Image (cartoon, grey):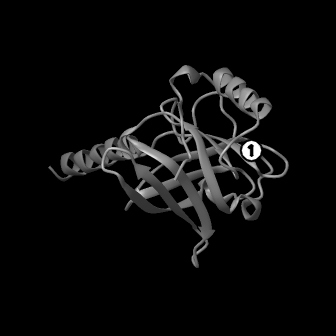
């Protein structure tokens, strides 16, 4: 009887590990390496994204990254909800996968122990524009240090995203008018 109970506990544990351990980057995507986390910190404007539950109806969206005392990165997301006509904010934390801050492969959490992939898959040499892939082909962001992005950079990032497998025709182009 003890062996059966032990087998049950072990198999349940393995199933739970399988449910909570998932890929943090889409197949075919590669995180930027080398990556300079210090250059990445600061305010970014969301230029485009796929629509999803937590950003639905938001425009004027920004993400500001800063270092926490414990070495994680504070994530401060803000946006204007066009339906509710009010500003919203979400504070989270990010940390590097495998504790390797030379690779732009992170996981971010806004809800306790639950993390999702955040992967910088393209960035310019001056850290002014970034293409960020989520954990799957359902999440994609184009970011800029300014409220607009040059057409050349936009087209380059769209091409990279399409090569990974993203359907870029589904991107929402974000307004920055407030």
Q: Residue furthest front?
A: 177
**In the displayed structure, would residue 49 be above or below residue 41?**
above
Residue 91: where, in percent of width, then height?
45, 64
Please tell me how many numbered marks the rendered image carries.
Answer: 1
> x, y percentage for residue 87?
40, 58
Can you name the residue that lies furthest to the right here? 125
Residue occupying the point 52% across, 53% down: 178
SS label for mark 1: loop
Mark 1 closeness class: few <14, some 14–19, many ≥20 residues within 10 Å: some
**Residue at image coords 58%, 79%:** 69
Residue 158 located left or right of residue 21: right
| Of 11 and 80, the residue lying toward us | 80
User: Residue 47 at x, y = what percent?
Assistant: 61, 41
Residue 30 is situated, as x and y percent measured from the top left of the image, at 69, 36
The residue tagged 1 is: 32
Q: Residue at x 78, y 47 (%)?
A: 33
Residue pictured at 23% horizontal, 45% vertical: 8
Which picture quadrant has residue 157? top right
The reply, left or right, for residue 53 in relation to residue 166 is left
Up the image or down, 137 lies above or below 120; here it is above
Q: Determine the residue located farthest toward the bottom in the rendered image.
A: 69
* In-image side of 42 versus 91 (left or right): right
Q: Nearer the viewer, residue 30 or 150?
A: 150
Near-viewer residue (112 or 97): 112
Figure check: 110 above or below 151: below
């Amino acid at each position: 009887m003890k062996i059966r109970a032990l087998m049950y506990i072990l198999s349940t544990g393995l199933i739970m590990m399988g449910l909570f351990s998932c890929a943090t980057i889409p197949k075919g995507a590669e995180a930027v390496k080398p990556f300079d986390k210090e250059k990445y910190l600061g305010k970014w404007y969301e230029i485009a994204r796929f629509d999803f539950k937590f950003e639905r109806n938001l425009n004027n969206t920004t993400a500001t990254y800063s270092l926490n005392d414990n070495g994680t990165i504070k994530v401060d997301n803000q946006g204007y909800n066009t339906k509710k006509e009010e500003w919203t904010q979400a504070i989270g934390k990010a940390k590097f996968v495998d504790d390797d801050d030379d690779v732009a492969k992170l996981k971010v959490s806004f809800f306790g122990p639950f993390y999702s992939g955040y992967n910088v898959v393209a960035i310019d040499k001056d850290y002014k524009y970034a293409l960020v892939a989520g954990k799957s082909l359902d999440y994609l962001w184009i970011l800029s240090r300014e409220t607009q992005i040059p057409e050349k950079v936009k087209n380059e990032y769209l091409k990279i995203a399409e090569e990974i497998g993203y359907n870029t025709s589904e991107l929402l182009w974000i307004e920055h008018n407030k």
